[in-house]
């Protein structure tokens, strides 16, 4: 039986404009097994998971569980949990981190609206390490994430070249192995160990690799596709050189304005299409026609 990732790859489904949407990520270390809805089906207390979901709803904060690559002991009560809050907007990205003893307190102890708006308010400590990769490995969500993601995470961790975590769910199972890299929040699909090393090395230099890139999570999907199209046109690699400053229209057609920090800008017309022929969006699901973001044109804006 073909997997969803095999079908997507064989049909050369495009990756641009498919990243999970999150201006800010809240990542909570929780070792042990994860269920399909990991916040309420892991060794994190279900009530705490539900409270976190409710606190984050509508704030622009996306919550995921993380764990170190490797074999996962059925551990109910680690003494401490590493947590990260990471904002991904261009020119305003940051990561704050801490070790805490009880994740249940996060639901009431954090200002989720402020975090989603990019204001950390001195929360925790600044993360001063290298950029790091988060590889989706939750096999209870989709088997491709386990079959393809776990070996990739293990290989990256064994290389010693970077900080690596497994993460519960970042969308796009059919693009497995999938991952995103902080602090900039660019997501990637159909990843290889060599490719991820290139992505992380570029991020250390403040650059973006566009190969196999799904988009920057700070933006909605039409804007993700538009920004990548401008990068392809101009060859711009600077992670914070481009920003999405306006999006007009509604599905299925948008006009996105992408601005460069040097004053240039481009109008990018993006149309939502449907993938044909039908294919499963996740293993075990009936074939469907997932949305795709097609860039119709990229035009320089006239100076004002």
Image: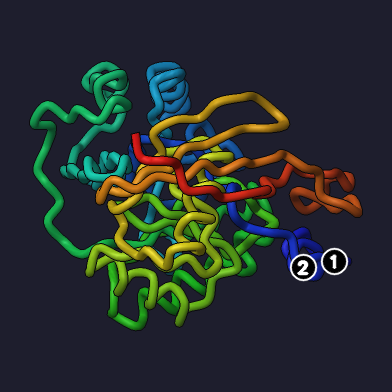
- Quadrant of the frame with the N terminus: bottom right
As displayed, is residue 158 above or below residue 20?
A: below
Q: On the rendered structure, is 270 left or right of 284?
A: left
Going by the image, does 219 lie left or right of 254?
A: left
Query: Where is residue 52 shown, x and y percent of the image?
Result: 39, 24
Residue 164, image x, y percentages = 35, 65
254 up-or-down from 126: above or below: above
Q: Nearer the viewer, residue 108 or 134?
A: 134
Q: Quadrant of residue 245?
A: top left
Q: Is residue 81 visible?
A: no
**From the viewer's perspective, is residue 269 above or below residue 144?**
above
Quadrant of the rendered image containing residue 130: bottom left
Residue under label 2, please give it: 6
Residue 241: % across, % down: 29, 53
The crowding category of the residue bearing disc 1, from other C-alpha atoms within 10 Å (few below 14, some 14 to 19, many at least 20), is: few
Toward the viewer: 210 or 180?
210
Answer yes or no: is residue 50 visible: yes
Q: Secondary structure at mark 2?
A: helix
Residue identified by numbered label 1:
2
- Distance, label 1 to label 2, CA atoms, is 6 Å
Above or below 289: residue 177: below
Residue name at image x 38 percent, y 17 percent: 55
Residue 135, given in percent of the width and then of the height, sits at: 47, 60
Q: Residues within 10 Å of mark 2 (few under 14, many from 20)?
A: some
Q: Residue at x 57, y 36 (%)?
A: 37
Q: Mark 1 falls on what kind of element?
A: loop
Q: Are marks 1 and 2 in contact (CB under 8 Å)?
A: yes
Q: Tell me what residue is drawn at x 21 percent, y 20 percent.
A: 109
Residue found 76% across the figure and 48% down from its top: 281
């Amino acid at each position: 039986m073909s997997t969803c990732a095999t079908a997507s790859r064989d049909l050369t489904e495009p990756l641009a404009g498919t990243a999970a949407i999150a201006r800010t990520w809240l990542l909570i270390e929780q070792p042990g097994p994860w269920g399909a809805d990991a916040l309420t089906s892991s060794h994190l207390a279900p009530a705490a998971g539900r409270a976190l979901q409710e606190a984050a709803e509508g704030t622009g904060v996306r919550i995921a569980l993380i764990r170190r690559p490797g074999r996962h002991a059925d551990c109910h009560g680690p003494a401490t949990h590493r947590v990260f809050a990471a904002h991904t907007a261009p020119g305003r990205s940051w990561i704050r981190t801490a070790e805490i003893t009880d994740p249940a307190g996060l639901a009431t102890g954090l200002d989720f609206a402020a975090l989603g708006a990019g204001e950390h308010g001195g929360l925790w400590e600044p993360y001063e390490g290298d950029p790091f990769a988060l590889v989706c490995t939750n096999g209870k969500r989709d088997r491709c994430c386990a079959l393809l993601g776990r070996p990739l995470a293990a290989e990256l961790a064994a290389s010693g070249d970077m900080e690596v975590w497994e993460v519960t769910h970042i969308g796009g199972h059919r693009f497995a192995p999938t991952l995103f890299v902080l602090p900039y929040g660019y997501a990637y699909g159909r990843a290889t160990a060599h490719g991820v090393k290139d992505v992380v090395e570029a991020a250390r230099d403040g650059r973006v690799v566009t190969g196999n890139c799904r988009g920057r999570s700070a933006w909605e999907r039409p804007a993700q596709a538009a920004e990548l199209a401008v990068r392809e046109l101009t060859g711009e690699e600077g992670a914070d050189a481009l920003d999405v400053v306006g999006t007009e229209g509604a599905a299925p057609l948008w006009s996105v304005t992408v601005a460069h920090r040097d004053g240039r800008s481009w109008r990018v017309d993006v149309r939502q299409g449907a993938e044909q022929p039908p294919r499963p969006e996740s293993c075990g699901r009936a074939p469907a026609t997932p949305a795709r973001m097609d860039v119709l044109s990229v035009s320089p804006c006239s100076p004002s």
